[in-house]
Image (cartoon, rainbow, N blue to C red):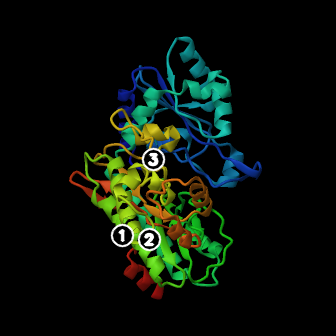
């Protein structure tokens, strides 16, 4: 964990941003996957970790705004726990490490909240995201679990986002640690991308790298020669020359800060002319998306500029026709890039997305576009120093989408369907980096991971 002063300052800043009442931030519990004592990989709730810092299950944090009191509710370990887990600090000792002096038994939380509600005090909480969270919130608050979302505090959502989206120096250090692990994940994969190797061999090595570096994957590894399936978690294919391997993978540090990197490698380590042309189109879009990043710039404009560059390259290949910018603004570019340029990133790989994608990526200044393709952008708001987000353009040839659009005659003024058809066996290319907005511009985080044609071919040879 960080120094206790960091957690204390975060909580103090949060309570200044919320008018009155009680802020309730539950931690996570263990989750079983085939019998009670056999649990999934432990992961603390990000908001609890951000404000209360203790990496243990069965806790809840409370900030009493009106009485300026911070409380951690939990349960002391029993002798049976110590037998299995070894000596552990007490609840009070753990709380002291994050600047909390008041602890209470978790069994008292329900009555504490009931008494507060009976006195007409507002209880602020965020959206739950696990079914057991809904059940527990029903027990604690007396609200039917089906109605819990109706009582979520929009005031608290805005306050949490305003703090978490501006990364502190200690957070940037953690994210760069995660990118360092991603460097090893991706360069290992590049060297392994040879004919006869299975996707699962590469995915397993990538995940192993995170464990070796005292972390874990920040999301399930995407490792596939079928790169046109955007979130493809199947790893059963054998690699063969002529295919492109998309690896979208990142790591979490032990403090839960994430990286999210994508690289695309030709199987066998050498780009053929067709692969090189599409790859360099995506790379040009990636570089354009990064080049434009600076404070005061709306990220939706970065998206449009990057995708326009992609369309310019596809026009050079006779895949599209007409004005490339118009192809973006009228939604034709969606056929080739159906996702946005990127998303916020930090303690969650899609940072704070559980608080609502529009809450995190948009606001009263920048509203979400309704144009196909641009509407897919998760992060469109005006950039500020401290924002960290991904820049991840891609180009995909999706047979099912192609057939639907061709049959409908959609955007014939922009799309050369006879040329696109020649690429339906191609798959896809995606290139993704993690970028910090600085006071004067931007910084691509971490050690540069090979991404030019020359760099990738060199590391594959090496």
Mark whose residue sits in front, 3 or 1: 3
> Which of the labelled discs sits on residue 183, or is there none?
2
> Which of the labelled discs sits on residue 447, or is there none?
1
Q: Position of residue 101 (x, y in %)?
A: 45, 33
Q: Quadrant of residue 456?
A: bottom left
| Left or right of residue 340: residue 206 | right
In this view, the residue in front, 88 or 226, is 226
| Left or right of residue 210: residue 388 | left
Q: Is residue 27 above or below residue 439?
A: above
Q: Is residue 276 above or below residue 12?
A: below
The reply to whether the C-beta atoms of the residues labelled 2 and 1 are less than 8 Å apart is: yes
Q: Position of residue 300 (x, y in %)?
A: 36, 47
- In the picture of the structure, the residue carrying the numbered disc 3 is 378
Give the CA distance from mark 2 to mark 3: 25 Å
Q: Secondary structure at mark 3?
A: loop
Viewport quadrant of the C terminus: bottom left
Q: Which residue is pictured at 50% across the width and 38% down the height?
A: 356
Q: If you read the primary sequence from the N terminus, does the residue marked by circle 2 or circle 1 appear first?
A: 2
Q: Residue furthest right?
A: 35
């Amino acid at each position: 964990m960080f120094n206790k002063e960091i957690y204390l300052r975060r909580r103090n800043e949060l309570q200044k941003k919320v008018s009155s009442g009680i802020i309730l931030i539950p931690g996570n519990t263990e989750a079983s996957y085939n019998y009670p004592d056999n649990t999934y990989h432990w992961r603390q709730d990000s908001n609890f970790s951000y404000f209360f810092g203790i990496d243990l299950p069965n806790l809840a944090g409370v900030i009493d705004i009106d009485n300026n009191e911070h409380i951690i509710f939990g349960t002391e370990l029993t002798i049976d726990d110590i037998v299995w887990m070894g000596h552990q600090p007490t609840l009070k000792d753990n709380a002291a490490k994050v600047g909390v002096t008041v602890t209470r038994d978790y069994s008292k939380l329900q009555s504490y909240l009931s008494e507060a509600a009976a006195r007409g005090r507002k209880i602020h909480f965020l959206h739950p995201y696990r079914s057991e969270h809904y059940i527990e919130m029903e027990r604690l608050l007396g609200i039917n679990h089906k109605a819990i979302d109706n009582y979520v505090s929009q005031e608290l959502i805005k306050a949490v986002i305003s703090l978490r989206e501006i990364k502190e120096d200690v957070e940037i250090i953690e994210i760069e640690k995660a990118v360092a692990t991603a460097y090893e994940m991706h360069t290992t994969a590049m060297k392994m991308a040879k004919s006869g190797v299975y996707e699962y061999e590469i995915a397993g090595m990538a995940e192993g790298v995170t464990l070796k570096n005292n972390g874990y994957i920040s999301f399930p590894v995407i490792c596939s020669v079928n790169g046109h399936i955007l979130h493809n978690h199947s790893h059963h294919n054998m690699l063969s020359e002529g295919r492109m391997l998309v690896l979208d993978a990142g790591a979490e540090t032990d403090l839960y800060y994430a990286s999210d990197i994508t690289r695309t490698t030709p199987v066998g380590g050498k780009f053929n002319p067709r692969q090189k042309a599409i790859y360099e189109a995506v790379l040009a879009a990636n570089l354009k998306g990064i080049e434009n990043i600076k404070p005061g710039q709306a990220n939706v404009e970065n998206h449009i500029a990057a995708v326009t560059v992609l369309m310019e390259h596809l026009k050079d290949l006779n895949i599209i026709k007409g004005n490339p910018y118009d192809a973006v603004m009228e939604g034709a570019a969606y056929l080739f890039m159906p996702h946005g340029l990127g998303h916020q990133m930090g303690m969650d790989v899609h940072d704070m997305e559980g608080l609502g994608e529009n809450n995190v990526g948009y606001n009263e200044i920048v509203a979400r576009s309704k144009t196909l393709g641009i509407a897919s952008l998760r992060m469109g708001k005006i950039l500020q120093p401290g924002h960290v987000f991904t820049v991840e353009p891609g180009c995909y040839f999706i047979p099912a989408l192609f057939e639907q659009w061709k049959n409908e005659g959609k955007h014939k003024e922009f799309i050369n369907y006879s040329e696109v058809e020649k690429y339906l066996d191609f798959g896809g290319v995606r290139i993704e980096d993690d970028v910090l907005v600085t006071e004067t511009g931007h910084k691509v985080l971490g050690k540069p991971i090979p991404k030019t044609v020359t760099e990738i071919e060199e590391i594959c040879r090496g």
